[in-house]
Amino acid sequence: MTATPEIGMVVVQPTAFCNIACTYCYLPDRSNKHVIAQSTVTRLFEQIFASGWSCPEITVIWHAGEPLVVPVSFYREAFATIERMRPASVHVKHSFQTNGTLIDGDWCTLFKDWSVGVGVSLDGPRELHDLHRKSRSGKGTFDKTIAGIRCLRENDVEFHVISVLSHTSLDQPEELLDFYLSEGIDQICFNVEESEGDHVSSLFHGPELRKRYASFLRRFWHLARRSGRVRFVREIDLALPRLFRPEGVPARNIQVEPLAMLNVDSHGNVSSFSPELLGLKNEDYRDFLLGNINFQSLQEIRDTCLASPLYRDITAGVQACSRSCDYFSVCGGGAPVNKLFENGSFTGTETSYCTLTQMVPTDLILEAYDRLAHSPAVVAPQAASSPSPVQSGDVAA
Ligand code: SF4
């Protein structure tokens, strides 16, 4: 019997439309301007709250295409509706992932009013950012994105950036850090250009990638800590508590738990597992959809999920990982979408994506921990008895 779902993250696609056209975009429907109905948002959260399946804190990510092409007033209404329905025991945290080009004072007011988490996609200084992040007419989008970031700073809105690393930027940790510091950016996440949907990354499959990425991240982490001006490097700071956690507590991987991650498109179609699956198609699994929240209950959607080849194969992949991978205890079985698009199947194990997101950060932390433990000047932390006995700064190279 599968455990009751614990919904921890809801990824809502308010529209598939995006106002720009990055060269590495995998979204097939990014010219479709349809916007999710308020009634669909209402029905979705009615179902979530009535199910009793929500975690005490749910993160709602408004994401993919560009969520800021939908007006501020839409979100004010949606947030107020969700707030009215929310049980007292559940905290809802809204979050946007945006290209930043449309941010202005009105958006900043919304972000502050609702304590919204903001992630801006910014690939670094102009020459790196404009390589791939282009307008629909083919021009670079750096000026607009950086104007959005400056607007966030002027209005004291907290944000992080997500930078996609390319062949060029992997060799430039110093330049990237200098740039972030010059723009007051102190929370940073990295993605490496991936193969997903129709987009095939040449970088992702290069034989030297693991070495190059490890060298990049080691150097960046070292420089960031030395600067004293970077608060968060996601790759390290999210890996630390997964690695140093209380004994017997498994590292959760919501990408492989049915409905733990609920992904909903602008028509109310529901998927689960990796959010990138929403909108993609495949011969074996067709459109990866499990139902539509406008016409089915969450219970029906869950039943469909549990009986699906999608769930069966993702579970087989997790079991294969548990048998074969030394990193399973921190990873929990990886990202299904990357297994499918890199290996051709959910049932496989290692991908370049898990090399970059699990193996390299884990190795770097253990490498630094080892150095710390053997330093005569420092008393090393004892075996883990709290979620994170060491902080990023303690073990930084
Ligand atoms: S790191 Fe990769 S191979 Fe290892 S458990 Fe995670 S997904 Fe599986």
Image: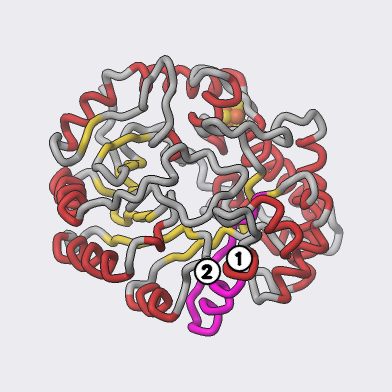
Q: Is residue 353 above or below residue 82?
A: above
Q: Is residue 216 above or below residue 297?
A: below
Q: In which quarter of the image is the C terminus?
A: bottom right
Which residue is pictured at 13% across the width and 36% down the height? 295
Residue 187 is labelled as 1
Which residue is pictured at 60% across the width and 25% down the height? 342
**Local secondary structure at mark 2:** loop
Dot 1 amino acid type: Gln
Which quarter of the frame holds ligand 1?
top right
> Between residues 289 and 156, which one lies in front from this camera angle?
289
Ligand 1 under 8 Å from disc 2 Cβ: no
**Local secondary structure at mark 1:** strand
Residue 74 pos. (x, y %): 26, 65
Which residue is pictured at 51% across the width and 76% down the height? 152
Residue 76 pos. (x, y %): 26, 70
| Residue 9 in sight | no
| Residue 312 in sight | yes
Contact? badges 2 and 1 (CB < 8 Å): yes
Q: How crowded is mark 2: few (under 14 residues within 10 Å), some or many (20 or more)?
A: many
- Residue 149 is left or right of residue 115, and the answer is right
Q: Give the range drawn in magenta.
A: 146-164
Circle 2 is placed at which residue position?
Answer: 159
> Between residues 138 and 307, which one lies in front from this camera angle?
138
- Residue 74 is left or right of residue 108, and the answer is left
Display coloring? secondary structure
Which residue is pictured at 46% across the width and 37% down the height? 28
Residue 97 pos. (x, y %): 47, 57
